[in-house]
Image: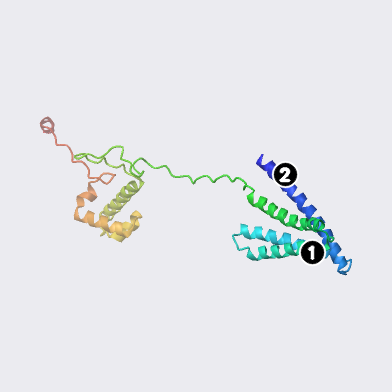
């Protein structure tokens, strides 16, 4: 309903503005001819006067939308509006009613043009669908601000061991390779070095030197370890019956 009302009122304002411009144009055109302006150029006189009014008012609207000052366009529109009214009255017959009739056309042109500017400024903007908010990563209950952990730690409880990740498994495999290289070099009668172990096992030299120092200080860790890098369990002690049978 609002859109229909706006279109009808805008069309009415345009019709009234065109009618006012036509009446004012005729009076100014006759005044130009009476002032001995050449007939071929006399039609430009009303265009200059009334056209400047329309352009000045449209400039006011543009300045308002751009949040700029519109003092000069307003002054220009006021001066040419007064000139148009004065010239229309000068062309009217020497009767008060006739002068009022001729003065109404330029006044109506100014008012209808200003009314059209207001309608353009009052037109509701097209609805814009708001942008969807950016998706947020789901947080665990413990990560949310102010959230309490699902299983609070109580005094005396031992924290559960964390499962071995890919990084821990990779380190365990590197340790096995370094230990195998260390044992192979000892079996070949060579003196193991950190750089040699690092090249043979494909690890960093710093890691090879650290394991070399560990194996050198405690040879049992280099010779008696499981595949996962933990010390091997001690062999079971034979029972008395097994000891008798062995004899």
Whether 161 is drawn above or below 240: the answer is: below
Tags 2 and 1 touching, CB below 8 Å:
no
Counting other residues with Cα less than 10 Å from the Cα at mark 2, is it few (<14), some (14-19), or many (20 or more)?
few
Residue sitting nearer the eye, 179 or 97: 97
Farthest residue in the front direction? 95
Q: Is residue 110 visible?
A: yes
Q: What secondary structure is marked by label 1? A: helix
x, y percentage for residue 199? 34, 58
Q: Judge depth for marks 2 and 1 and give the one in front.
A: 1
Q: How many marks?
A: 2
Q: Going by the image, does 8 lie left or right of 140?
A: right
Residue drawn at point x = 10 percent, y = 31 percent = 240
x, y percentage for residue 101? 80, 55
x, y percentage for residue 200? 34, 56
- Specify the quadrant that holds the N terminus: top right
Q: Earlier in the sequence, mark 2 or mark 1?
A: 2
Farthest residue in the right direction? 39
Find residue 194 and name its label: none
Counting other residues with Cα less than 10 Å from the Cα at mark 1, is it few (<14), some (14-19), or many (20 or more)?
many
Residue sitting nearer the eye, 143 or 163: 143
Residue drawn at point x = 61 percent, y = 63 percent = 69
Q: Going by the image, does 222 lie left or right of 71?
A: left
Q: Which residue is mark 2?
A: 8
Residue sitting nearer the eye, 23 or 204: 23
Q: Going by the image, does 3 lie left or right of 136?
A: right
- Report the Cα–Cα distance between label 2 and label 1: 32 Å
Q: Which residue is mark 1?
A: 87
x, y percentage for residue 226? 26, 44
- Specify the quadrant that holds the C terminus: top left
Quadrant assignment, res 207: bottom left
């Amino acid at each position: 309903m609002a859109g229909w009302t706006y279109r009808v009122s805008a069309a009415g304002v345009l019709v009234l503005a065109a009618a006012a411009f036509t009446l004012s144009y005729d009076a100014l055109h006759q005044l130009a001819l009476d002032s001995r302006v050449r007939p071929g150029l006399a039609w430009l006189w009303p265009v200059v006067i009334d056209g400047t009014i329309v352009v000045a008012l449209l400039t006011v609207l543009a300045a308002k939308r751009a949040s700029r000052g519109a003092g000069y366009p307003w002054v220009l529109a006021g001066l040419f509006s007064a000139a148009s009214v004065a010239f229309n009255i000068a062309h009217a017959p020497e009767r008060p009613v006739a002068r009022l009739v001729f003065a109404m056309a330029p006044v109506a042109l100014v008012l209808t043009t200003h009314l059209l500017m207001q309608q353009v400024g009052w037109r509701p903007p097209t609805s814009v669908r708001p942008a969807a908010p950016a998706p947020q990563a789901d947080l665990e209950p413990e990560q949310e601000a102010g959230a309490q952990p699902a299983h609070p730690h109580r005094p005396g409880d031992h924290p559960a061991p964390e499962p071995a990740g890919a990084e821990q498994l990779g380190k365990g495999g590197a340790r096995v390779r370094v230990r195998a290289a260390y044992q192979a070099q000892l079996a070949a009668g060579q003196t193991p070095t950190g750089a040699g172990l690092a090249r043979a096992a494909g690890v960093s030299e710093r890691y090879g030197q650290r394991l070399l120092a560990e194996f050198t200080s405690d040879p049992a860790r280099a010779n008696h370890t499981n595949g996962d890098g933990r010390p091997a369990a001690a062999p079971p002690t034979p029972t008395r019956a097994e000891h008798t049978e062995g004899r």
